[in-house]
């Protein structure tokens, strides 16, 4: 077993998980009496956050207790990035088989083996730099994940330097949609099936410009061979949701635009289906992205009805 009893709040440190070329830390949350073949969700914190911060705000461990799935929280170290952001733009960290992306893959494998996880139900989500790193993991290891959720993130392959990363965050320049689609397709030799994708972004996000949403959609819509026009457009908890489905009606790609929200993870902290706690970059806007993402993945929550 790679897990230790050293805990801070709700999470436990995972001390051994392969060669760890990206020099990341790893924490887990394993509910009591977790059944065999349970799902696993990987959660990537944002800039200036810790794994504990993000779990406390997002409420993922609350949902894990309710619905019986395991959690893995990769965590950045300050000597890798002064602002504790995952290095999603660095070529040495964003290519399959190298750096931080390989460290996260190794963590996943350790938790899968330690806790008899169902390999067909492994999911990943993250905020901001963690959202961009979610894009990296979905692109470079698509065979590992059944689904991913990118919150206030960026498309895979849009930057390879710090300067370019800041420009993309501001919505300036960058590769064409065709180039982004090609970079996603060439990030691995995988040929399907592909993860389902959930995208969340505030319409008034001044840290990661909302124009990145359309780039992410275009990137995955091209790969999944989906039509340009959404299959469904409707309101959920007062916010617009777009859905792209395949010919059989399976929802493969969804996008929530949280109108009026700035940079952060959308939360509903109270009432039915509420979880988490508001704080820096954890924004109570009366919709729980945590709950809806879990439902989209079929993790025990009630699926969105339209």
Image (cartoon, rainbow, N blue to C red):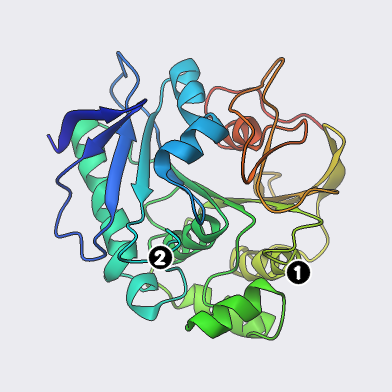
Could you tell whether 51 is left or right of 304 in the image? left
Q: Which mark is residue 246?
A: none
Q: Which residue is mark 1?
A: 211
Q: Position of residue 108 (x, y in %)?
A: 29, 47
Frontmost residue, 31 versus 47: 47
Marks 1 and 2, how far apart in space? 26 Å
Residue 236 drawn at (x, y percent): 82, 35
Instruction: Say which element carries label 2.
Output: loop
Instruction: Tell me the residue at 38%/56% (across/down).
Output: 143
Q: Nearer the viewer, residue 180 or 279?
A: 279
Helix, strand or loop at label 1? It is: helix
Q: Quadrant of residue 251?
A: top right
Quarter containing the C terminus = top right
Q: Which residue is mark 2?
A: 82
- 214 over 40 or under it: above or below: below
Residue 280 in sight here: yes
**Viewport quadrant of the N terminus:** top left
Q: Residue 122, how many percent across, how many down?
A: 40, 42
> In the figure, residue 111 lies in which quadrant?
top left
Residue sitting at x 24%, y 53%: 106
Q: Earlier in the sequence, mark 1 or mark 2?
A: 2
x, y percent for residue 150: 59, 53
């Amino acid at each position: 077993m790679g897990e230790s009893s050293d805990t801070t709040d709700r999470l436990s440190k995972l001390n051994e998980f392969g060669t760890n070329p990206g020099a990341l830390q790893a924490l887990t949350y394993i509910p009591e009496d977790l059944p065999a073949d349970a799902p696993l969700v990987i959660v990537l914190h944002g800039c200036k956050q810790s794994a504990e911060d993000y779990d406390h705000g997002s409420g993922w461990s609350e949902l894990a207790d309710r619905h019986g799935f395991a959690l893995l929280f990769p965590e950045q170290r300050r000597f890798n990035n002064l602002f504790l952001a995952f290095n999603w733009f660095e070529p040495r960290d964003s290519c399959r088989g190298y750096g931080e992306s390989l460290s996260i893959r190794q963590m996943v494998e350790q938790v899968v083996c330690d806790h008899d996880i169902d390999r067909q139900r492994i999911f990943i989500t993250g905020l901001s730099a963690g959202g961009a790193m979610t894009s990296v993991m979905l692109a470079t290891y698509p065979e590992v994940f059944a689904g991913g959720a990118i919150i206030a993130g960026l498309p895979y392959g849009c930057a390879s330097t710090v300067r370019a990363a800041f420009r993309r965050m501001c919505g300036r320049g960058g590769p064409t949609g065709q180039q982004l689609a090609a970079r996603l397709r060439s990030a691995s030799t995988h040929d399907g099936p592909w993860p389902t994708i959930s995208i969340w972004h505030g319409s008034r996000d001044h840290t990661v410009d909302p124009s990145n949403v359309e780039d992410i959609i275009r990137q995955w819509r091209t790969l999944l061979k989906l039509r340009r026009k959404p299959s469904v457009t409707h309101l959920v908890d007062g916010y617009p949701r777009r859905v792209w489905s395949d010919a059989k009606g399976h929802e493969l790609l969804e996008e929530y635009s949280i109108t009026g929200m700035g940079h952060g993870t959308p939360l509903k902290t109270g009432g039915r289906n509420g979880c988490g706690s508001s704080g820096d970059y954890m924004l109570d806007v009366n919709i729980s992205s945590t709950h809806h993402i879990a439902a989209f993945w079929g993790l025990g929550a009630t699926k969105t009805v339209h």
